[in-house]
């Protein structure tokens, strides 16, 4: 195999297509629409007419020898089964949603007379319930565990050999290395059609701080463009939050968030509103947050969260029963860009009176299983506020008495909190992701975060390597794991994944070999049964100068013809004969002759094959090239003029058409 020519994404997509095709090609799930050669939107009359025509072709009484009668009887039963399912509205609705399994479960849903729409909704609901049962264990619950580790507190023990040489260095104590633990778990359930309930439990241990609570959330969805939710804890502090979203159009949306920290309205609510717009591959949002440190005239003048309340507020206002979070007011601009499948970019600029910051991240996706993200952040651009300074909305602010009204240029604190980070994300399997993130911060030191996520459950381990900036530690933490991950990915994991894909492809082909062989025998016997009647109809059509199929091939027509929508005479003829030659010279032919099978489907000098699905389920067809894109080539004569056309496997075919005429191309 040429490794350089191997395309992982293409091969994985091919494997998924083969697995879907194998499921559709299975005898346990036949395509009744293809068996009767009708579209999925065909009326009951069209189904009935097609059944009458197909049943006449394969009626056992039309065949005299015992072997032919047996094959005809088998095909006749298949046609009868397809007709019974598609002519009944209940069975057809069940088949459209769940296939043959839905037909078998039809009786379980009752026999009450319902409209076709009600039947469709009932089976859709049943299919959805089945799917929910399969994934409910994972998708309906969510958990996150974070353990903060301070590696600078881990003590090491070194000992010497008898000769005095250095032997090893191992940890003998981990007292104080765990600096914090955060755990969160939630599960959701549908309380009504548009109402979702969620219960969340949180626990936080960080130094002397201890916090635990249980939250309940109700989320109401109004259509597909809007939703609103309310969240409230079961234990103090009773912080109530309201959230909502409305998507005005495909390019514009709005969100709002209101958070109230005290039920007695001792503090003002924090309100944030976001406006978003989509500009092609760029998404921009503008968020304005009031915080909870403001006043509205006399309202919340004695709030413990307002500016200056720590030292100047000596009133006898009611004291809160729990510590309150001081939320500053900010204005934020976010940009998200995804120019291609490999590259994406996001940036955030937040401006506030107390603090401002800028964050930018760039992600490059090496392939579907590995990506690298680099980011830069700068914080600390703000005006230093004294304990006596605060703003009141609606009041005049005296710049001479308030220290906050100082010159902006002289009040900038500077870059007191700059950071850079490098993150590498790897996909272990379809459900598991592993990330390695290194953050170098001027104020907090160097931290490595290892995160493992499986379904909706994640474990994070932030490890503080050093509380100060050490360039050698930063270099080792950033570049050595990246180099090791890239080497492991390209030298070990990627070749192993290629071998696994190729092995699965070979196994899938081997699994289907016997099944496809039986299908081929069945198709060939079907053609043998059709031959006498089809030859008579061809002779009559040729005498009447009607529609006659002269030659037809179905399968992998790889000879550059399948990828083109061209009816060039010389190209079609050359490739056609090459294809015919391939039928007799290869051990496993890549195409099959379906001339008589197509002729049997002609009605009133017309042949129509609906789009969707593979054509291998048509009578007299089989899959000669499993796992490969197939096409149908047809050469036919109508009114003495030769026509040729080629269509892909999932495309519709309608003949005769003037565009297929070879005379117009000469």
Image: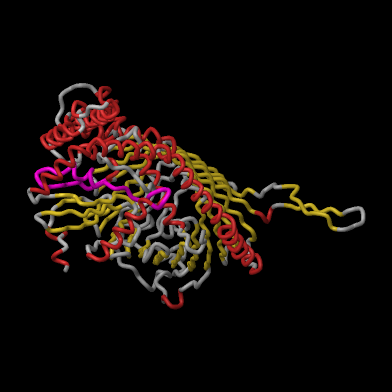
On the image, the x and y values in percent for residue 405 come to 39, 72
- Which quarter of the picture shows residue 321? top left
Say which quarter of the image contains residue 572.
bottom left
Residue 363 in the image, given as x and y percentages of width and height? 45, 63
Please tell me in which quadrant of the rendered image residue 25 appears: top left
Residue range highlighted in magenta: 585-613
Front one among 99 and 544:
544
What number of labels is visible?
0
In this orientation, which residue lies closer to the viewer: 496 or 644? 644
Whether residue 595 is in magenta: the answer is yes
In the image, 40: left or right of 579? left
Spot occupied by residue 368 in the image (x, y as percentages of width and height): 45, 56
User: Image height check: is 608 above or below 60?
Assistant: below
13 lies left or right of 649: right
Image: 405 above or below 187: below
Q: Is residue 456 visible?
A: no
Could you say where residue 560 lies in the image, as x and y percent from the top left? Answer: 33, 62
């Amino acid at each position: 195999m040429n490794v350089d020519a191997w395309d992982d994404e293409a091969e994985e997509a091919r494997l998924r297509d083969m697995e879907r095709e194998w499921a559709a090609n299975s005898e346990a799930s036949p395509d009744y629409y293809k068996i009767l050669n009708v579209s999925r939107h065909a009326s009951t009359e069209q189904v009935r007419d097609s059944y009458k025509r197909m049943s006449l072709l394969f009626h056992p009484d039309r065949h005299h020898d015992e072997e032919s009668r047996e094959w005809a009887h088998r095909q006749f039963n298949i046609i009868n089964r397809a007709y019974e399912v598609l002519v009944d509205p209940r069975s057809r609705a069940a088949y459209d949603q769940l296939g043959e399994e839905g037909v078998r479960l039809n009786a379980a849903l009752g026999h009450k007379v319902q409209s076709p729409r009600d039947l469709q909704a009932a089976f859709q609901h049943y299919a959805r319930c089945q799917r929910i049962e399969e994934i409910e264990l994972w998708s309906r619950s969510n958990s996150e565990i974070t353990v903060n580790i301070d590696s600078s507190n881990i003590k090491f023990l070194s000992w010497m050999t008898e000769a005095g040489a250095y032997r090893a260095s191992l940890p003998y104590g981990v007292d104080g290395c765990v600096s914090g633990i955060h755990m969160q778990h939630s599960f959701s359930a549908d309380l009504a059609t548009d109402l979702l309930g969620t219960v969340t439990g949180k626990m936080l241990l960080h130094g002397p701080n201890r916090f635990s609570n249980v939250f309940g959330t109700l989320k109401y969805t109004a259509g597909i463009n809007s939703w609103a939710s309310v969240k409230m804890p079961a234990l103090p502090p009773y912080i109530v939050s309201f959230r909502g979203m409305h998507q005005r159009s495909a390019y514009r949306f709005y969100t709002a968030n209101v958070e109230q920290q005290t039920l007695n309205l001792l503090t003002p609510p924090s309100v944030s509103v976001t406006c978003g717009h989509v500009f092609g591959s760029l998404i921009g949002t503008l968020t304005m947050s009031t915080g909870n440190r403001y006043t509205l005239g006399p309202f919340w003048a004695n709030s413990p969260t307002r500016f200056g309340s720590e030292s100047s507020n000596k009133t006898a206002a009611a004291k809160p029963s729990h510590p309150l979070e001081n939320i500053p007011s900010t204005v934020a601009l976010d940009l998200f860009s995804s120019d291609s499948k490999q590259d994406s970019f996001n940036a955030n600029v937040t401006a506030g009176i107390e603090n401002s910051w800028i964050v930018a991240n760039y992600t490059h996706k090496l392939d579907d299983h590995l990506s690298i993200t680099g980011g830069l952040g700068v914080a600390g651009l703000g005006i230093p506020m004294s304990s006596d300074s605060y703003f009141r909305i609606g009041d005049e602010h005296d710049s001479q008495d308030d220290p906050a009204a100082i010159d902006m240029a002289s009040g900038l604190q500077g870059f007191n909190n700059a950071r850079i980070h490098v993150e590498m994300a790897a996909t272990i399997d379809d459900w598991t992701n592993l990330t390695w993130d290194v953050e170098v911060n001027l104020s907090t030191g160097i931290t490595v975060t290892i995160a493992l996520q499986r379904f909706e459950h994640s474990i994070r381990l932030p490890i503080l390597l050093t509380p100060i900036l050490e360039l050698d530690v930063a270099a080792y933490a950033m570049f050595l794991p990246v180099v090791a991950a890239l080497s492991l990915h390209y030298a070990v994991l990627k070749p192993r994944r290629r071998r696994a894909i190729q092995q699965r492809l070979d196994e899938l082909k081997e699994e289907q070999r016997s099944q496809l062989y039986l299908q081929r025998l069945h198709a060939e016997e079907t053609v043998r049964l059709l031959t006498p009647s089809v030859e008579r109809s061809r002779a009559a059509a040729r005498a009447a100068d009607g529609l006659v199929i002269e030659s037809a091939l179905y399968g992998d027509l790889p000879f550059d013809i399948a990828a083109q929508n061209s009816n060039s005479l010389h190209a079609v003829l050359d490739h056609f004969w090459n294809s015919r030659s391939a039928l007799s010279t290869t051990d496993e032919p890549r195409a099959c002759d379906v001339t008589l099978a197509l002729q049997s489907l002609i009605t009133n000098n017309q042949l129509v094959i609906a789009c969707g699905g593979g054509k291998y389920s048509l009578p007299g067809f089989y899959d000669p090239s499993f796992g490969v894109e197939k096409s149908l080539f047809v050469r036919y004569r109508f009114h003495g003029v030769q026509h040729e056309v080629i269509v892909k496997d999932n495309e519709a075919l309608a003949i005769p058409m003037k565009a297929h005429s070879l005379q117009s191309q000469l």
